[in-house]
């Protein structure tokens, strides 16, 4: 069919070159359009501010009244000049970032700079590059043109089958975390809620931060515990350095990658749960909705950091642990619920939980991410929102179709739907030459280096 329709594109090499040239032209055109739109936006803002300065009757009236009003006008003019200065600096920053013409992954930088510009409380007279004091993850070279030697990662994690395990224990008022070497027993059976775990969290995992340094993961159903889940939970252990990691399950995971996780992470504690079956007098249909409700119950009871099992953590979240509740914005404009950072009895989590009295079982995200977004607008003082989606949730097409630059991100949500077959094929060997966002992020977590390796 291709041969009949496009007789000049018979050879595969010619097809490849044609597609690559078209893709390059499209990327270049998109970049030019984006840059042009941004410049137009800045010019419009300039004009708007200048018109406001010239036409605002408030300033004219104040000039005629008294010297005090002149002082007030000077303050207003100073604020406007500050904004103009910051816009000029932002334009310079955007030009520097996009220099080269092929760096579509830099969009996260521009979005962050725009958010900084729009901060109403900002009064500094000099625009501050939001990244000048930030050490980028993975370095500054994102060309992926060179290969480096890979470490023998398999032996690092398997450790000849020798397992260390931290076990919480409570005897009256004596609360301990005991490290056991060559652990080959079954886990103690903890449930939810559990008084002993509550004591351990309160006495041993809570420091000067408002949010205790514990991670919560939920595993419901009998799905296969694949390589992706191992890397995700290991990334939380490695980069957050939590006191404990709780995995809430109805059926305990099993298989090769679960065993590798147990050999690699000594402070993971499985917790047996009975997932909620009803709420607001209505039957819960989807297992995902059960997980949505369970995570809110867990955070209300214990506080901590909830992470989905397909959420990679790239760096510590301690920056957010002195806020009562933190969530991030996803690419669709709603909150993402794969990362929730909250203190015990968080007021925002309580209001979110109360909203389930109007639970709508047949609507996918109505009571979860959509409701959380609505509540944040109603009660903005109860939650901190990371507004640029690149912090936790890059657009899902970036995962396999791009090499998204995550050097200023806290994490990456993997977005499983539609990628299950591809994700099941990943392992220590296949990620070495996987030249996309997932490959680079997995190598960074496991090999301490994002570069392609052999």
Image: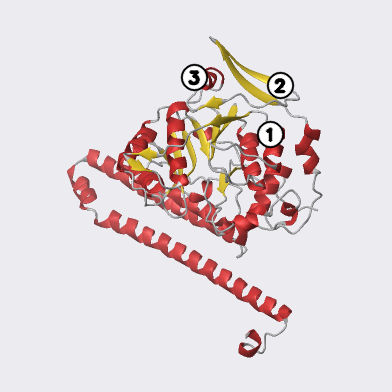
**Contact between labelled residues 1 and 3, with CB atoms less than 8 Å apart:** no
Q: Quadrant of the N terminus?
A: bottom right
Tell me residue 288's x, y (percent). 47, 46
Tell me residue 297's x, y (percent). 43, 32
Q: Quadrant of residue 380?
A: top left
Residue 119 appears in the rendering: no
**Contact between labelled residues 1 and 2, with CB atoms less than 8 Å apart:** no
Q: In terms of sequence position, does the residue under pointer 3 or pointer 1 come before the other?
A: 3
Q: Which residue is labeled 2 in the image?
A: 180
- Compared to residue 121, the image places residue 177 above or below, namely above
Q: Nearer the viewer, residue 238 or 226?
A: 226
Q: Residue at x 60, y 50 (%)?
A: 406
Q: Which residue is labeled 1 in the image?
A: 262
Q: In terms of sequence position, does the residue under pointer 2 or pointer 3 come before the other?
A: 2
Callout 1 secondary element:
helix
Q: Residue at x 57, y 58 (%)?
A: 398
Q: In terms of sequence position, does the residue under pointer 2 or pointer 1 come before the other?
A: 2
């Amino acid at each position: 069919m291709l041969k009949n329709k496009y007789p000049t594109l018979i050879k595969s090499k010619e097809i490849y070159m044609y597609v690559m040239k078209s893709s390059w032209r499209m990327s270049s055109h998109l970049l030019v359009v984006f840059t042009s739109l941004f410049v137009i936006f800045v010019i419009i803002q300039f004009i708007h501010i200048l018109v406001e300065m010239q036409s605002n009757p408030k300033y004219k009236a104040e000039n005629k009244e008294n010297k005090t009003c002149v002082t007030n006008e000077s303050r207003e003019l100073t604020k406007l000049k500050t904004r103009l200065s910051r816009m000029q600096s932002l334009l310079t920053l955007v030009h520097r970032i996009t220099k080269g013409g092929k760096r579509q992954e830099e969009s996260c930088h521009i979005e962050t700079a725009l958010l900084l510009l729009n901060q109403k409380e900002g009064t500094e007279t000099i625009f501050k590059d939001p990244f000048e004091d930030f050490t980028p993850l993975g370095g500054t070279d994102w060309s992926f043109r060179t290969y480096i030697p890979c470490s023998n990662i398999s032996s690092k994690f398997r450790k000849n089958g020798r397992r260390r395990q931290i076990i919480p224990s409570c005897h009256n008022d004596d609360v301990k975390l005991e490290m056991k070497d060559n652990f080959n027993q079954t886990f103690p059976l903890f449930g939810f809620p559990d008084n002993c775990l509550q004591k351990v969290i309160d006495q041993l995992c809570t420091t000067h931060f408002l949010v205790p340094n514990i991670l919560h993961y939920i595993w419901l159903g009998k799905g296969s515990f694949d390589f992706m889940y191992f890397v995700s939970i290991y990334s939380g252990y490695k980069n957050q350095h939590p006191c404990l990691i709780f995995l809430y399950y109805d059926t305990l995971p099993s298989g090769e990658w679960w065993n590798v996780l147990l050999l690699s992470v000594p402070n993971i504690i499985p917790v047996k749960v009975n997932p909620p079956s009803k709420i607001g007098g209505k039957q819960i249909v989807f297992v995902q909705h059960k997980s949505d409700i369970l995570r809110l119950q867990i955070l209300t009871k214990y506080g901590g950091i909830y992470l989905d099992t397909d959420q990679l953590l790239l760096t510590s979240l301690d920056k957010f642990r002195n806020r009562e509740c933190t969530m991030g914005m996803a690419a669709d404009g709603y909150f993402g619920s794969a990362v929730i950072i909250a203190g015990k009895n968080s007021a925002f989590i309580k209001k979110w939980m109360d909203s389930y009295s109007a639970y709508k079982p047949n609507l996918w995200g109505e009571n979860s991410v959509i409701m959380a977004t609505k509540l944040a607008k109603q009660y903005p003082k109860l939650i901190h929102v990371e507004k640029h989606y690149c912090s936790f949730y890059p657009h899902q097409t970036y995962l396999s179709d791009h090499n998204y630059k995550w050097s200023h991100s806290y994490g990456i949500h993997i977005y499983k739907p539609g990628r299950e077959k591809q994700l099941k094929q990943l392992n220590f060997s296949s990620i070495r030459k996987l030249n996309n966002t997932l490959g680079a992020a997995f190598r960074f977590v496991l090999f301490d280096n994002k570069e392609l390796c052999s």
